[in-house]
Image: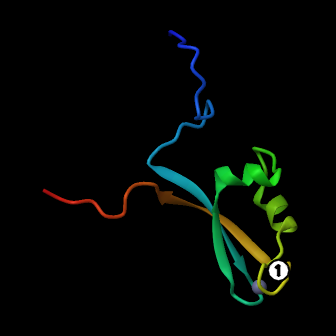
């Protein structure tokens, strides 16, 4: 395999596909829900192999300040939502 020497913007071992793993975050107290792309969690200083338990312990609801939040992973298609058909 040849190496071009060009830096890749895709981390090795985690090639970008048509789906993105997102983390859904739901507040159990006020019902506020949001989600974040898993890859963006690195900006929060989380380990690459973080667990959702670790994440959940750090989270506080932005709306009501409750720590009673639940998180779960899900896959989201990362393609255009509207595609013209011909
Ligand atoms: Zn809340």
Q: Quadrant of residue 14?
A: top right
Q: Which residue is at the front of the view, 84 or 31? A: 84
Q: Residue pushed farthest top?
A: 2
**Image point (58%, 14%), residue name:** 5
Q: Tell whether 19 sits left or right of 24.
A: left
Q: Tell whether 4 sits left or right of 69.
A: left
Q: Quadrant of residue 9?
A: top right
Q: Residues within 10 Å of mark 1 (few under 14, many from 20)?
A: some
Tell me where residue 63 appears, x and y as whole percent: 77, 84
Q: Residue pushed farthest front?
A: 6
Q: Residue pushed farthest left?
A: 86
Image quadrant occupied by the C terminus: bottom left
Q: How is the image coloured?
A: rainbow
**Image point (63%, 68%), residue name:** 35
Q: Tell whether 6 sits left or right of 72.
A: left
Q: Is residue 73 above or below residue 16?
A: below
Q: Is residue 35 above or below residue 39?
A: below
User: SS of the residue at dot 1?
Assistant: loop
Label 1 sits on residue: 68
Ligand 1 in which quarter: bottom right
Tell me where residue 19 appears, x and y as whole percent: 48, 52
Does the residue tagged 1 have its C-beta within 8 Å of any atom of ligand 1?
Answer: yes
Q: Is residue 10 above or below residue 75?
A: above
Tell me where residue 52 appears, x and y as whole percent: 76, 60
- The number of callouts visible is 1
Q: Quadrant of residue 66?
A: bottom right
Q: Is residue 58 above or below residue 63?
A: above
**Image point (82%, 80%), residue name:** 68
Tell me where residue 36 appears, x and y as whole percent: 65, 63
Q: Which residue is at the front of the view, 12 or 83? A: 83
């Amino acid at each position: 395999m040849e190496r071009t020497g060009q830096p890749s913007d895709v981390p090795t071992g985690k090639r970008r596909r048509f789906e993105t793993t997102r983390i859904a975050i739901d507040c159990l107290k006020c019902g506020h829900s949001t989600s974040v792309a898993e890859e963006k969690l690195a900006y929060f200083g989380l380990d690459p192999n973080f667990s959702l338990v670790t994440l959940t312990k750090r989270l506080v609801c932005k709306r009501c300040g409750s720590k009673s939040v639940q998180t779960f992973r899900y896959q989201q298609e990362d393609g255009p939502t509207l595609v013209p058909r011909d």
